[in-house]
Image (tube, rainbow, N blue to C red):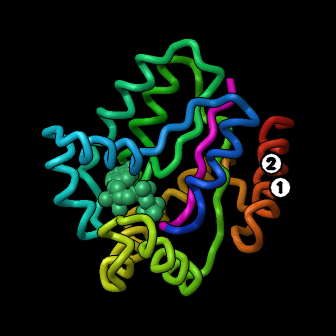
Amino acid sequence: MLNLVLFGPPGAGKGTQAEFVKNKETLLHLSTGEILRREISNGTELGVEAKKWMDGGNLVPDEVVIGMIRNIIERNPDVKGFIFDGFPRTVAQAEALDIMLESMNIPISGVVSLEVGEQELTDRLLERGKVSGRVDDQDESIIANRIAVYTKNTMPLLDYYKNQEKHFGVNGTGSIEEIADRVAEAIQRIKNR
Ligand code: ADP
């Protein structure tokens, strides 16, 4: 079983790289952002609630996303592994994920962390906003808030995973292919441990 977390700030390219990894390693790709946006477009109760947080660039409450992830993990007992993208985003989420996976005897194998500077993140997100239609990509102050939320709530996870010796940093700048190669190398190191 290979369980990976693809970690990084908004705009680091987690979704793009997760697609490569998912195909190469045959993992189930779990993007909480994508799952939430699907709930929004289906007009579900969960989607209506989540949209209030997402449009301002704030985090959806922990219990909502943890419940979502738990459901999916429980419904997929036969997969080769998971690649988590955009989850966990808080220490509470990471702790809940560890408890879920340990109880099933499938702990996280490693965390690949995409490293990109703040100015490049903002530029990438504004560029994506021109085509993505995402409310949270179109306004510089919402983007700044997402990066601030990342710094305050999500960055502490770096230490959480470093303490577990599961953290693998990767330079997230350059061409998509270059970054994919670096991610693949990090995954190889995780597998060799
Ligand atoms: P990005 O990484 O570019 O911010 P995502 O699609 O991962 O894009 O997330 C978009 C939004 O969805 C977040 O700003 C947040 O509101 C919500 N979201 C996604 N994942 C989580 C999570 N694990 N916990 C809380 N909110 C989340």
Q: Name the side, left or right, on which 44 lies relative to 122.
A: left
How far is mark 2 from mark 1, CA to CA? 5 Å
Q: Position of residue 92 (x, y in %)?
A: 36, 47
* Residue ID for mark 1: 181
Give me the residue at 84% from left, 50% from top: 185
**Relative to residue 32, is residue 141 depicted above or below?**
below
The residue positioned farthest toward the top in the image shown:
78
Q: Secondary structure at mark 1?
A: helix
Give me the residue at 33% from left, 43% from top: 38
Query: Is residue 177 in the magenta section?
Result: no
Mark seen at residue 94: none
Mark seen at residue 184: 2
Give me the residue at 32% from left, 49% from top: 37
**Relative to residue 161, is residue 145 depicted above or below?**
below
Q: Position of residue 154 (x, y in %)?
A: 44, 61
State the image quarter where residue 136 is shown. bottom left
Q: Name the side, left or right, on which 110 lies relative to 136.
A: right
- Position of the C terminus by quadrant: top right
Task: Identify which amino acid the numbered label 2 is placed on.
Answer: Ala
Q: Are marks 2 and 1 in contact (CB under 8 Å)?
A: yes
**Relative to residue 36, is residue 159 depicted above or below?**
below
Give me the residue at 41% from left, 18% from top: 74
* Mark 2 residue crowding within 10 angstroms, few (<14) / some (14–19) / many (20+): some
Q: Which SS type dominates the magenta stretch?
A: loop
Task: Identify which amino acid the numbered label 1 is placed on.
Answer: Asp
Quadrant location, ligand no. 1? bottom left
Q: Position of residue 9 (x, y in %)?
A: 51, 67
* Mark 1 residue crowding within 10 angstroms, few (<14) / some (14–19) / many (20+): some
Q: Which residues lie in the magenta part?
A: 1-10
Query: Is residue 2 in the magenta section?
Result: yes
